[in-house]
Amino acid sequence: MSLALLVGACGSSPNLQPPRELEPIDEPMRIDTVWSGQAGRGAGEQSLQLPVRHHEETAYAADYQGYVKAFAVDSGKTVWERQTGLELATGAVHANGRLYFGTRQGEVVALSAEDGRELWRSELSSEVIARPAVADGTLVARTNDGKVFALEAASGLRRWVYDRDVPALTLRGNSAPIIVNDLVIAGSDNGRLTALVLDNGSVFWETPISHPSGKTELERMIDIDAEPVVVDEMVYAVTYQGRLAAVDIRSGRVQWTREMSSYTGMVADDQRIYLTDSEGQILALNRRNGSTLWRQDKLQRRNPTRPRLEGPYLVVADYDGYLHWLLRESGRMEGRARLNAGAYLFTDESDDYEHVFRKENNVLARPLVVGERVIAVDRHGFLAAFRRAE
């Protein structure tokens, strides 16, 4: 049994420092609020990412108490809502008219995307806090005890299980599996990246991204909690307190590595990888060799989310409900908007930074981009859509 460690807004440093204060932006780009609303209770005080996801013109939000809401992307108007009674632990995954969720009870559940009716549920070995992946009629889910399950997407019947031991001490989070062609790419808490054959779960290759070092269990943590990213035939994976690596997807051979620590994740375009590191810095790296192209440190210890591409910009959200627009070319801050400004549920006046910042770690999941809309949800279920003013 592993012990999960929560890494909060102030990072992993034992000498806790407050988040960096935001600096004014010279001639900021105007960001308009298109609509706002509520979608249940969000993550509450749970350490869960419950991102909003969409299919075509409908988006889906869920809370930790089992409430699911479908709403129109353009207007925010409710299409349907349902209370499932489940302890949901992931955002929705849409495929073939179904919504798939992982639960804290160790289940995967399928709902109808049309009205939220439960279609099936399948019991796994432990809680599912990383979103499942679906392709070619197969659903793949990773459980908190290190196993990877493949289920029939239409029925929930089990196809195969891959078992991997987890270290005694891990971060509170799991890397979501991804399906690329006929392979399942899964990161583990021991710093290894594994490619499994989608059809039968056999190991196609396994590659260590990082190796543990240090004297204590805390220093030796090298979890892969960030979702791997695939561009062309290359897989990019990063560990906590370890390395970022580019791995050939067909052979498992490491093409390059560099020291890096991240548990949040990254996104890529044709030329660059954009990554949020464990200190809250946003970096752009050359996709060919991993060299740093720019580094933005103005969000240090603000717990920024994994970046999202939005036209020529990156969008990240932070612990205090701010969304930030950065130029992809240079990393320069161009715009800022706040989600649910001044409407926090917590009013604790304590000077204990750890206590206060964990409670007000407002946006946990990266924003959703649909066309010109950027949609974000805070940990209390408040939703808003933003748009750059022309």
Image: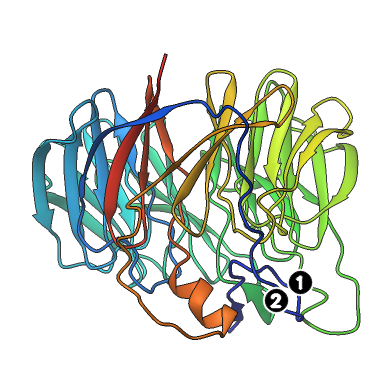
Name the residue located 37 percent from the left edge and 48 percent from the top edge: 339
Name the residue located 44 percent from the left edge and 53 percent from the top edge: 321
Callouts 1 and 2 close, C-beta under 8 Å: yes
- Residue 309 against residue 86 in the figure, above or below: above
Amino acid at the residue labelled 2: Pro
Is any atom of residue 353 visible in this view?
yes
Q: Which residue is mark 2?
A: 167
Name the residue located 68 percent from the left edge and 57 percent from the top edge: 224
Counting from the top left corner in percent of width and height, residue 144 is at 51, 69
Badge number at residue 292 = none
Name the residue located 58 percent from the left edge and 27 percent from the top edge: 27
What is the quadrant of the N terminus in the image?
A: bottom right
Pick the front one: 293 or 167: 293
Disc 1 residue crowd, few under 14, some 14–19, many 20+, Cα 10 Å? many
Q: Quadrant of residue 370?
A: top left
Q: Is residue 184 left or right of residue 360?
A: right
Q: Which residue is mark 1?
A: 221
Counting from the top left corner in percent of width and height, residue 273 is at 72, 32
Q: Is residue 170 left or right of residue 244?
A: left
CA–CA distance in space, label 1 to label 2: 8 Å
Q: Is residue 372 left or right of residue 190?
A: left
Is any atom of residue 182 visible in this view?
no
- Residue 180 against residue 228 in the figure, above or below: above
Amino acid at the residue labelled 1: Met
Disc 2 residue crowd, few under 14, some 14–19, many 20+, Cα 10 Å? many
